[in-house]
Image: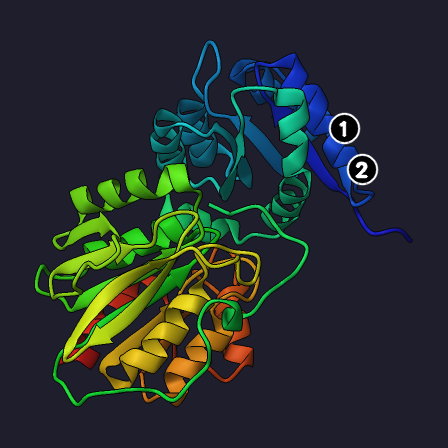
Amino acid sequence: MADKKIRVLIVDDSALVRQILTEMLAEDRSIEVVGQASDPYMAREKIKQLNPDVLTLDVEMPKMDGVTFLSNLMRLHPMPVLMVSSLTEQGADITLRALELGAVDFVTKPKVDLAHTLADYAEEIRAKVKVAAGVNVRALERMALQPHPVDAKLSADAVIAKGIPQHLKTTEKIIAIGASTGGTEAIKEVLVALPANAPGIVITQHIPEAFSRPFAERMNSLAAMTVAEARDGDQIVPGYCYIARGGKHLLVVRSGARYYCQVNDGPPVNRHRPSVDVLFRSVAQNVGPNAIGVILTGMGDDGARGLREMKDAGAPTIAQDEATSVVWGMPGEAVKHGAVDTQLPLGTIAGKLMSLVR
């Protein structure tokens, strides 16, 4: 008996986008587009009739915007939703709000030459639909950016060579956090629970360039700490959180007894830029036992090897547990690699971090 196909409903006011998405998804035999809707009211009826496994939802639509519809949907009929967003600052803000409301992830669509450039996203869209079909919807309910894939899957060696760690004995701690699918909300939950005087934090979240600054600004408005997009040469100090810029790797380097952010243009690692493995390796080599590593919800295995390097360098390590993860890919792989000291529900991670600091 053939495996059950993933049933998808496409909601977009553009007939061209609906057609392109349908054709893209139909190329994968494990996916079946069961319907289309041009506005949220039609989508509501189609959901009742067709009971799809995954919904792709345009952010900007007539009659009712996608975020309002998503809010109602997650309250009345929770299901995996993949947002389709424009790569603009306004689109980024709206999409981040959608992730807060329970959307699994998002794909971006260009503003020009839609028919040709959207096709470049085909593999990413199909992969994210498959991930969405298998997410932990209960984790999304509790909680209510990936760069394009490349052919070669490079390791952190492509950006930072594995060398002899250089550590200094110090009381100053650095917390390094990595996340992907579902990570924007998981990061928020950790940050808002930390005090203003928490140790310096460096974060790599898989996110496009247009989204990282709005994401950092949103976190800054909610957290007691000061949160900003990392700049090359920023000194990492207590009370500040530095988020990797989309399209750039974030590394931690040391000069004397001080730690700094380094923004790096190296190739994608594990098909991501920024990459969690790159951040974690730099922390393992330059901070070592003075660091704490945290890996949160996310698709794939980016960060698993880097977290193991942090653990081997003497840093305590934490993974979000499966029950509270939207996708237990990255944390699960870290556990398989023997990289994790402690698995914790998302809501307890901030408290554990502060106990480790103390």
**Residue 321 visible somewhere in the drawing:** no
Q: Position of residue 319 (x, y in %)?
A: 41, 72
**Would you say 356 lies left or right of 68 here?**
left
Mark 1, residue position: 23
Give the residue type at disc 1: Glu
Nearest the viewer among 245 and 192 is: 245
Q: Position of residue 238 (x, y in %)?
A: 11, 66
Residue found 29% across the figure and 87% down from its top: 166
Q: Is residue 341 above or below residue 251?
A: below
SS at mark 1 in the image? helix
Q: Badge 1, how many Cα within 10 Å: few under 14, some, many 20+?
A: some
Nearest the viewer among 106 and 248 is: 248
Q: Position of residue 81 (x, y in %)?
A: 54, 37
Q: Which residue reaches farthest left? A: 197
Residue found 79% across the figure and 34% down from its top: 26
Nearest the viewer among 194 and 176 is: 176
Disc 1 vs disc 2: Cβ atoms closer than 8 Å? yes
Give the residue type at disc 2: Glu
Residue 27 is tagged as: 2
Among the 4 quarters of the image, the one containing residue 290: bottom left
**Residue 135 visible somewhere in the drawing:** yes
Residue 124 is tagged as: none
